[in-house]
Image (cartoon, rainbow, N blue to C red):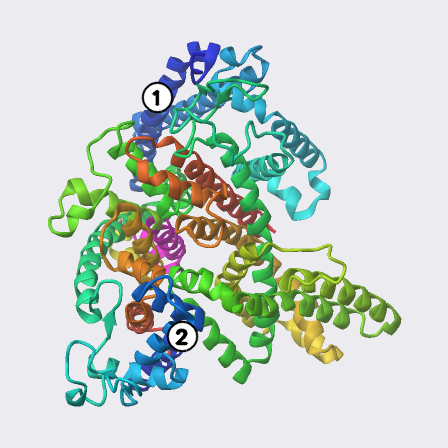
């Protein structure tokens, strides 16, 4: 069979699309130069009408061309879904058809969020900022892709199966013999003749299932240690700060190499570290509830028992892999990756929380709380922490991105995850050996990782803008 | 000031000791030693053979004693084989008669040990490789710092302008692109048959003879990731300065915008980026490891990966000493520099 073209029947639009991009580049440069000089004139009080007019035209031009490009992308995506056969869809159309569940989920999320945005607090305000919306869209795209990919809705082939004759084939190559399988490798084959598209989709799940939780754990550790360090100060603060600086002074890669090698795993050190790090969420929840319901002993006891039973059950399963009911298990190599990422991230979170708490500690409402006779933990968790949430939420988004980069680094050095694993870092590492001849196996995961981290950064930017507006 | 520096140096030495001890502990765990014995001897070594190898090379002494020997504060071990009477000593590894060996040989005596992977003195390996990485770092700084400062100042001098938005977008995009991603993209675009083949995808030859062709891509790859962060910090500091009272006074006085930026704002805006650039070094070190692996440039990062992958204890320890010293010294310089640059800060 003939290989697929990139855009199928819509290829008539390709020259326009290319021209639009070139025009966009020129217009952006022109706009920057023109507005630069226009503003300069304004300051010098020598407003020359022609430069300002030029600047206005340039700004308008950029807007029109950007709109055109967006429209064309929309045409490619929607048109690709609507085209009847794979040949007319082309690669872009076929990929877009495979991603149909993602598009629907995105549309539903956005429609619902925009309709109810006034009732959704900070999350709703996100939809007032263009940057935030773009970031959120990219992030949710990857989240949905990961989830539906894990449910086997999107992938076209098994990401681990090798099809003979498909080694390093370019995107859109047809499979040699089709028996009920999807007839093309949409994004080509890698050096072991596996489908790149399916691997990228599965790789998204590897990130989505680890990064947010690892970041959350790092935040729990950082908050549980950072708040008392700032609030009590003194020797506790000195010791904790010293330890966190110690970890921060370690080059991350050296730490990874030391923690994730099989010999170290054999000694069980990562498990002990997991045992220490994973106890923090339980401590955090217990203190949180205890300080809140201290004056209502019945309620407090009920909540505490629930949290402790649930928490310790999950803890025994996750950290020690010895769940008494046998329901929860955590793959040992994933645990090592998880632990090392949490370990690297927590000192930074600790420093951020400590810094914010030191600032908030001096506020009047904290003093008022102290005079009311509130306990130190109540003040920390129910007075200081809620008021620190703005910067912490922003940092949380940024940190998920950083964690994604760290996971990619681990994969890039072949540490931790199994060599067959479809995660993006490992795939880039596999592809880099033949990069100058067959770049496509490494490029697809590279762009995926970049877009996800970019989305998280934009989301953080949007959140920061909106939270500063209050 | 003197006491401040002294105290900082004290904390620094304590930190370095703690960190090297952690590395020492992790590299001297028994499974790691067993792997070392098997790679040095042969893969099918019996357990007794492993034990005797480790005994002969002094690996079975208590951890603290070994650490002291490595530091050079405890006399190096001398081991006598009870059966053959052959003597091995820590300080006499290279064909020296054990009886003539010095008593102490450690870091303090300038003896960094012997690399089991490269079969060479660690100090000479580190010196050569650090030189190569120094070359890389120098060009990275030459490219990164000026471009980041220019981007930051241009973006920050008129907050919210078109220029600001374009440059800020660029900064965000660059911080979102780790080295292994930008490296792959740059190689594809500029050094592969799919794109323009104007540069080389490997930098191995740059070790002897660095040219634009083989050295630009690695330098660009490391710089790109750092530029965004420094530029954003510079922008933040610049926007803060531009809203300050003295800038408004200068403007009202009739000083031209160009002069306000160049003569009044710039110097004050560059204090914060100085600290940021200094604190970027640990990150640069990371980038160096990734880029040297990606471009096969045999510098310090490449050695670190080799040492860690083969549990070459002496070399790995030396690498961590260098890395830790780099990180701590840059932190110290950034603190001291900050005090010098900003006279409003009081040291208590």
Instruction: Give the crowd class for mark 2: few <14, some 14-19, many >=20 residues within 10 Å.
Output: few
Name the residue located 81 percent from the left edge and 64 percent from the top edge.
Answer: A306
By secondary structure, the bulk of the magenta-drawn segment is best described as: helix
Residue B131 picture location, percent across and down: 17, 61
Q: Is residue A131 visible?
A: yes
Magenta segment boundaries in residue numbering: B226-255
Q: Which residue is mark 2?
A: B48
Element type at marker 2?
helix
Residue A203 picture location, percent across and down: 52, 40
Element type at marker 1?
helix
Q: Quadrant of residue A358?
A: bottom right
Q: Closer to us: mark 2 or mark 1?
A: 2
Q: Which residue is mark 1?
A: A23
Q: Residue furthest left?
A: B209
Residue B202 picture location, percent across and down: 23, 43
Indicate whether B91 appears above or below B221.
Answer: below
């Amino acid at each position: 069979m003939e290989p697929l073209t990139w855009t199928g029947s819509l290829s008539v639009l390709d020259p326009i699309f290319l021209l639009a991009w070139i025009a966009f580049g020129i217009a952006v440069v022109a706009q920057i130069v023109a507005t630069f000089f226009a503003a300069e004139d304004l300051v010098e009080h020598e407003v020359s009408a022609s430069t300002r007019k030029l600047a206005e035209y340039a700004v308008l031009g950029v807007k029109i061309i950007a709109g055109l490009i967006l429209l064309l992308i929309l045409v490619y995506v929607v048109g690709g879904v609507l085209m009847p056969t794979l040949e007319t869809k082309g690669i872009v159309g076929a990929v877009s058809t495979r991603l149909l569940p993602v598009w629907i989920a995105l549309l539903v999320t956005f429609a619902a969020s925009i309709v109810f945005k006034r009732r959704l607090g900070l999350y709703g305000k996100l939809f007032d900022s263009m940057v935030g919306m773009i970031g959120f869209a990219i992030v949710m795209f990857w989240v949905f892709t990961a989830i539906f990919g894990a449910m086997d809705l999107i992938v076209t082939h098994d990401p681990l199966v090798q099809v003979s004759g498909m080694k390093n084939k370019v995107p859109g190559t047809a499979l040699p013999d089709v028996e009920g399988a999807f007839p093309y490798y949409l994004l080509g084959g890698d050096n072991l003749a596996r489908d790149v598209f399916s691997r990228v989709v599965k790789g998204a799940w590897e990130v989505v299932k680890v990064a947010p939780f690892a970041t959350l754990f790092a935040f729990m550790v950082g908050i549980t240690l950072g708040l008392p360090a700032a609030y009590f100060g003194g020797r506790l603060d000195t010791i904790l700060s010293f330890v966190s600086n110690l970890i921060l002074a370690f080059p991350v890669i050296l730490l990874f190499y030391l923690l994730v090698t099989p010999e170290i795993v054999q000694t069980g050190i990562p498990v002990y570290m997991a045992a220490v790090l994973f106890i923090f969420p339980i401590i955090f929840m217990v203190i949180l509830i205890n300080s809140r319901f201290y004056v209502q002993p019945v309620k407090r006891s009920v909540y505490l028992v629930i949290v402790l039973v649930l928490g310790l059950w999950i803890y025994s399963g996750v950290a020690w892999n010895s769940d008494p009911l046998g329901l929860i298990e955590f793959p040992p190599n994933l645990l090592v990756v998880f632990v090392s990422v949490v370990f690297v991230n927590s000192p930074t979170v600790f420093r951020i929380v400590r810094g914010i708490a030191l600032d908030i500690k001096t506020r009047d409402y904290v003093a008022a709380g102290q005079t009311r006779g509130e306990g130190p933990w109540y003040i920390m968790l129910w007075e200081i922490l809620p008021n620190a949430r703005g910067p912490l939420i922003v940092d949380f988004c940024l940190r998920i991105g950083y964690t994604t980069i760290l996971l990619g680094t681990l994969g890039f050095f072949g540490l931790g995850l199994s060599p067959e694993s479809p995660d993006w870092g490992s795939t880039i590492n596999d592809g880099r050996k033949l990069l100058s001849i067959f770049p496509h196996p490494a490029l697809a995961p590279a762009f995926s990782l970049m877009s996800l981290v970019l989305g998280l950064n934009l989301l953080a930017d949007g959140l920061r803008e909106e939270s500063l507006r209050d | 000031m003197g006491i401040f520096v002294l105290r900082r140096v004290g904390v620094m030495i304590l930190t370095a000791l703690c960190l090297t001890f952690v590395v020492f502990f992790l590299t001297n765990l028994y499974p790691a030693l067993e792997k070392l014995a098997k790679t040095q001897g042969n893969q099918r070594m019996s357990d007794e053979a492993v034990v005797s190898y480790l005994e002969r090379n002094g690996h079975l002494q208590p951890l603290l004693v070994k650490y002291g020997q490595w530091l050079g504060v405890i006399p190096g071990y001398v081991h006598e084989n009870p059966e053959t009477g052959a003597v091995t000593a820590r300080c006499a590894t290279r064909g020296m008669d054990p009886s003539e060996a010095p008593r102490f040989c450690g870091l303090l005596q300038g003896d960094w040990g012997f690399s089991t992977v490269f079969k060479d003195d660690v100090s000479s390996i580190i010196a050569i490789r650090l030189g190569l990485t120094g070359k890389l770092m120098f060009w990275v700084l030459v490219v990164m710092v000026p471009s980041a400062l220019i981007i930051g100042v241009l973006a920050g001098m008129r907050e919210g302008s078109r220029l600001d938005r374009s440059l800020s977008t660029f900064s965000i995009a660059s911080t979102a692109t780790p080295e292994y991603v930008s490296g792959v993209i740059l190689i594809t675009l500029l050094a592969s048959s799919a794109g323009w083949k104007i540069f080389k995808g490997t930098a191995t030859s740059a070790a002897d003879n660095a040219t634009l062709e083989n050295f630009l891509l690695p330098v660009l790859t490391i710089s790109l990731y750092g530029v965004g962060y420094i530029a954003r910090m510079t922008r933040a500091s610049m926007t803060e300065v531009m809203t300050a009272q003295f800038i408004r006074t200068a403007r009202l006085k009739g000083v031209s915008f160009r002069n306000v930026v160049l003569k009044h704002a710039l110097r004050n805006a560059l204090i914060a980026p100085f600290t940021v650039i200094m604190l970027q070094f640990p990150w640069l070190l990371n980038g160096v490891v990734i880029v040297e692996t990606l471009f096969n440039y045999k510098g310090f990062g490449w050695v670190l990966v080799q040492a860690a992958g083969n549990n070459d204890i002496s070399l790995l320890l030396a690498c961590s000493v260098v890395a830790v010293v780099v990180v701590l010294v840059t932190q110290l310089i950034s603190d001291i520099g900050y005090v010098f640059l900003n006279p409003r800060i009081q040291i208590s």
